[in-house]
Image: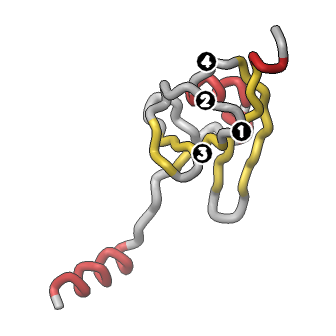
Amino acid sequence: MTNQDFYNVQVVYALKDVQTVIDLQVKSGTTILKAIENSGIKSKHPEIDLENLSVGIFAKLKNPETELQDGDRVEIYRDLLVTKKVTKTNSLKVEI
C-alpha cells in the first residue's frame, strides 16, 4: 500500500478538566467506530460506551459508520449533566 491508502486522523475525547487527543493513521475506508476502536482510547476512558456513542467530525454530528477522510478529527461526545438548579433556572426563563 502507498501512503495515499492511509489517512492521518485524530480521535478526541474531552472531560471537564482533561482532553485526550490521539493521532492515528488509518486505512482509507475506515469508519469512525473502527478508528475509535483502533485508537485504544477505551483503555484510558473505560466509561466510553461503543454501543451508545454520539460522535462527530469537526463539531458536526455523524453516524459511527461514516468513512473518514484524511485530516478528520473524530470527536467522542459525552452526555452533558444538567443540575437541578440549571434546569429550574431554564424553566423559569421559559415561563417569564
Q: Residues within 10 Å of mark 1 (few under 14, many from 20)?
A: few
Residue placed at 75% from the left, 46% from the top? 21
Q: Residue furthest left?
A: 95
Task: Determine the residue located farthest toward the top in the rendered image.
Answer: 1
Instruction: Count every numbered label the image shows and give the total.
Output: 4
Q: Relative to residue 9, is residue 29 depicted above or below?
A: above
* Marks 4 and 1, how far apart at CA: 14 Å
Dot 4 or dot 1: first in sequence order is 4
81 or 9: which is nearer to us? 9
- Residue at disc 1, secondary structure: loop
Task: Say which residue label 4 marks.
Answer: 29
Q: Is residue 83 left or right of residue 60?
A: left
Q: CA distance from mark 3 to mark 2?
A: 12 Å
Look at discs 4 and 3 and give the one toward the viewer: 4
Amino acid at dot 3:
Glu
Q: Which residue is mark 2?
A: 68
Q: Which residue is mark 1?
A: 71
Is the image coloured rainbow, by chain, by secondary structure, or in one colour? secondary structure
**View extreme (bottom): residue:** 96
The amino acid pointed to by label 2 is Leu
| Dot placed on the residue nearer the N-terminal end, 3 or 2 | 2
Say which residue appears at 67% left-offset and 19% top-offset. 28
